[in-house]
Image (cartoon, helix red, strand yellow):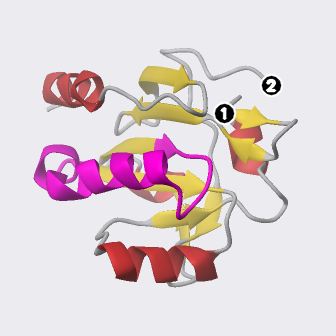
Amino acid sequence: MTTPEVGSQAPDFTLNDQQGTPVSLASFRGEKNVVLVFYPLTFTNVCKGELTSISEDLGRYQNDDTQVLAVSVDSFFSHRVWADEQGYEFPILADFWPHGETAKAYGVFDDALGVAKRGTFVIDKAGVVRWSVVNAIPDARDQDAYAAVLAELS
């Protein structure tokens, strides 16, 4: 699958967060912009660095107008341990089963490795993709880029 184009409707999904609570993209429609952050695997260094960076400056990415949602193919049980250990205060969603289905819908699933690439999508309150970037698995993202897009939406 290809990544949704800027200006297109973002594919909807419902995934369990680290507490096992279902979270759907549609639930934010009309309420909040969404920063959707796909990452390969929980407990890995680059992923930890990226999510910790978001966590340390959370007000920049998550506030009354915007919600951060992180997604990997790990189970919500792994996410719970990791979120508690790292102090993450945003939903970490399990694209566990069917394996990688949401990552596939966003065109960021790596079939050979069975994990998501580093894809980030900024989705506005109407559910429209306003910005995206997809990096190779070893390459960390420039978070200032999507912070700038969020500033324009506010």
Q: What amino acid type should be assigned to the residue bearing mark 2? A: Met
Q: Which residue is mark 2?
A: 1
Q: Is residue 138 magenta?
A: no
Residue shown at 69%/59% (left/top)?
95
Residue shown at 36%/46% (left/top)?
50
Q: Secondary structure at mark 2?
A: loop
Disc 2 crowd rating (10 Å Cα; few below 14, some 14-19, many 20+) is few
Q: Secondary structure at mark 1?
A: loop
Q: Which residues are magenta?
A: 37-66
- Marked residue nearer the N-terminal end (1 or 2): 2
Q: Is residue 38 visible?
A: yes
Mark 1–mark 2 contact, CB under 8 Å? yes
Q: Is residue 7 above or below residue 128?
A: above
Which residue occupies the extreme top position in the image?
6
Q: Which residue is mark 1?
A: 106
Q: Is residue 63 visible?
A: no
Residue shown at 69%/58% (left/top)?
73
